[in-house]
Image: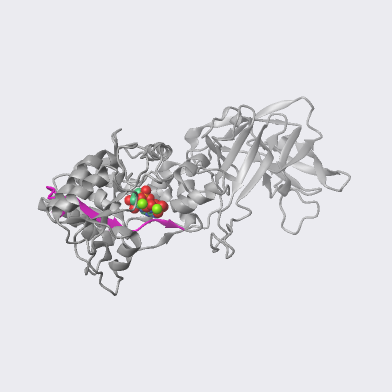
């Protein structure tokens, strides 16, 4: 059955189309350009865009820029980039609520003339005081019944800049005893002598969100105005504005629950403060879940889409497990990325019976689960690197990697046996001397004896040196972001920088944004900010270990 696989929004739309309430579907994503977008916004973008697409409808990107104090063009640019990156096609045109300020002003005059709005000269605190509480009805302002002509004249003077900030506001005249506080004569215009990122100094009065939003939706011909649950209580006001302004075919607001993810920080306010306090390296610090950070880290739009599909759309508040997101990232990259060998904490190994100055090129499959990716040649020679953690001088039982006298397989190459351990003056192991057995070449069909461990490695003179950055959650598991004393409570292990890593020569020409699997370590992406001609930096996108079971 079709309706069972449809989410609740699609069911509403189906009904609307059936009943002829609307003849098409038109959605929008309305960010406020006051910060960078995060993974939560991706849910809204993909939902709005995906819904429009499913119904062959249209999708608008509209900047809800009614609050000039916090908004910047820089944010507009980053939001456009993020929405494009996610593949949400908004038809190339960006809309701005501020483009409708003229219409909104005219609409306000219409409301005043209808006796549905008035200028209030009470101070902000007095308005708040009279608004009442959930259990107590509000009280009328003494200005509530002032003559229409007086409100019209004052509103015009407000617009002309004759009053300072806060001197008066325009309020909708609805119902001070409504059980819904949003309906108790909400403020719809205020004075702010602030330069606007789009309209400059043309205006010194600005509409409030709850008034501007329905008008913006109606002007653009939006049918389904999909937003998050915190706006549920605002819907009566949304509908009131549209009704009083007599728009034909008014849009319909539908709410869904926000995406929350465990162990990460969403919320522009916190993100902004982390950036401003220098706790992170900008909005695109790979420990953040802004879309620019995820992109820099190497997360793909496809994996974000897959994640959103798994999470689904509903009205119930819940938090998705970050491990589920990581699962989606791995699933997306698994068959697409070459699996290379890298050594992130190197230990040098000299293969004493391998001729000096000789090199041979061995075959390695690019991706064992996807034959189509072909094979590559990897150099093998006398000096290689293995991981420090793949050798122990005094191993516990069941340690199958390298230790004195033990033999292991080098992946795609030969068996080697540890013959001698070289240490520095402090007793630190700095090099191993091993022998190799030419009979044991990988792919030769050798069955003479078996070894239990297989190690990854790279040929020392041919390897590409790189910096590798490993990440953990920025929050300590289960702990709050801010400590009792007000300090940030950041996980000190959230970033580990390894400066001397060696990677197969395959990555020699890797470009910022390219990504690979490094065997055993996970998926890595070339950092687009700190990589230079002669300094390659890799961010770990995700490790290979998974705690999530689909
Ligand atoms: P934040 O609360 O993170 O600061 P915001 O809601 O203030 O975000 P807006 O720019 O107003 O940011 O958001 C644009 C749209 O994105 C809104 O429709 C909002 O409901 C939606 N949105 C914001 N956060 C989430 C989230 N976590 N999950 C789903 N949608 C979200
Ligand atoms: Mg907002
Ligand atoms: Mg916010």
Answer with the quarter of the image where residue 132 lies.
Answer: bottom left
Q: Please give left or right for residue 17 compared with residue 490 in the image.
A: left
Instruction: Return the residue nearer the eye: 128 or 443.
Output: 128
* Residue 168: image location, x then y, percent: 29, 54
Determine the residue positioned at 39% across, 39% down: 76
Q: Residue at x 25, y 66 (%)?
A: 180
Query: Which of 233/348 is in front?
Result: 233
Which of these two is toward me, 215 or 104?
Answer: 104
Residue at (39% x, 62% y) in the render: 318
Image location of residue 258, percent across then percent down: 37, 57
372 displayed left or right of 203: right
Residue extending farthest to the right is: 425
Query: Residue most toward the top?
Result: 357
Tell me if residue 306 can be seen. yes
Question: Does the magenta run of residues contain 259?
Answer: yes
Q: What residue appears at the point 18 percent right and 44 percent down from the top-left corner? A: 106
Total numbered circles: 0
Region rendered in magenta: 243-261
Instruction: Name the quadrant containing residue 468.
Output: top right
Q: Is residue 53 magenta?
A: no
Q: Is residue 542 above or below residue 505?
A: below
- Of the 4 image quadrants, the one containing the N terminus is bottom left
From where the camera sits, is residue 412 visible? no
Quarter occupied by the C terminus: bottom left
Left or right: where 359 falls relative to 133: right
Q: Nearer the viewer, residue 205 or 395?
A: 205
Point out residue 164 in the picture as x, y percentages from the top left corner: 34, 48
x and y percentages locating residue 13 in the rendered image: 19, 52
């Amino acid at each position: 059955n079709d309706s069972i696989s449809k989410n609740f929004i699609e069911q509403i739309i189906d009904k609307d189309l059936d009943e002829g309430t609307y003849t098409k579907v038109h959605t929008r994503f309305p960010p406020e350009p006051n910060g960078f977008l995060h993974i939560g916004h991706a849910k809204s973008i993909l939902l709005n865009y995906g819904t429009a697409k499913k119904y062959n409808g249209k999708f608008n990107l509209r900047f809800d820029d009614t609050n000039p104090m916090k908004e910047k063009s820089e944010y507009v640019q980053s939001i456009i980039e993020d929405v494009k990156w996610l593949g949400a096609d908004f038809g190339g045109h960006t809309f701005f609520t501020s483009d409708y300020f003229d219409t909104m002003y005219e609409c306000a005059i219409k409301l005043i003339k209808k006796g549905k709005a008035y200028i209030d000269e009470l101070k902000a605190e007095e308005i708040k005081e009279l608004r009442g509480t959930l259990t107590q009805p509000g009280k009328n302002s003494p200005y509530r019944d002032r003559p229409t002509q007086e409100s019209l004249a004052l509103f015009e003077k407000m617009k002309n800049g004759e009053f300072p900030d806060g001197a008066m506001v325009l309020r909708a005249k609805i119902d001070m005893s409504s059980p819904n506080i949003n309906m108790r004569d909400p403020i719809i215009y205020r004075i702010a002598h602030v330069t606007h990122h789009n309209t400059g100094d043309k205006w010194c009065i600005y509409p409030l969100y709850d008034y501007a939003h329905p008008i913006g939706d109606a002007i653009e011909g939006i049918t389904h105005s999909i937003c998050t649950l915190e706006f549920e209580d605002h819907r009566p006001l949304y509908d009131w504005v549209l009704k009083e302004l007599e728009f034909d075919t008014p849009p319909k607001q539908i709410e869904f629950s926000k995406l929350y993810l465990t162990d990460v920080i969403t919320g522009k306010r916190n993100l902004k403060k982390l950036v401003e306090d220098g706790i992170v390296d900008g909005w695109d610090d790979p420990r953040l879940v802004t879309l620019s950070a995820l992109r820099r880290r190497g997360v793909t739009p496809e994996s974000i889409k897959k994640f959103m599909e798994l999470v689904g759309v509903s009205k119930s508040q819940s938090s998705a497990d970050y491990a589920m997101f990581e699962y989606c990232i791995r699933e997306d990259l698994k068959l697409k990325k070459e699996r290379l060998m890298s050594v992130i904490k190197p230990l040098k190994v000299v293969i004493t019976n391998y001729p000096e100055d000789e090199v041979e090129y061995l075959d390695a499959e690019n991706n064992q689960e996807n034959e189509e990716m072909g094979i590559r040649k990897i150099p093998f020679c006398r000096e290689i690197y293995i991981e420090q953690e793949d050798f122990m001088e005094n191993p516990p039982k069941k340690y199958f990697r390298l230790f004195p006298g033990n033999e292991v397989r080098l992946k795609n190459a030969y068996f080697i046996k540890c013959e001698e351990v070289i240490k520095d003056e402090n007793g630190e192991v700095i090099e191993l001397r091993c022998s190799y057995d030419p009979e044991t070449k990988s792919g030769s069909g050798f069955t003479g004896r078996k070894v239990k461990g297989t190690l990854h490695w790279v040929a020392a003179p041919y390897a590409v040196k790189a910096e590798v950055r490993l990440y953990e959650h920025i929050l300590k598991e289960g702990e709050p972001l801010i400590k009792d004393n007000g300090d940030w409570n950041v996980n000190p292990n959230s970033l580990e920088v390894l400066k001397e890593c060696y990677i197969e020569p395959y990555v020699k020409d890797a470009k910022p944004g390219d990504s690979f699997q490094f065997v055993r370590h996970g998926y890595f992406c070339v950092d687009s900010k700190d990589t230079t001609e002669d300094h390659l930096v890799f961010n770990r996108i995700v490790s290979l270990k998974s705690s999530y079971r689909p």
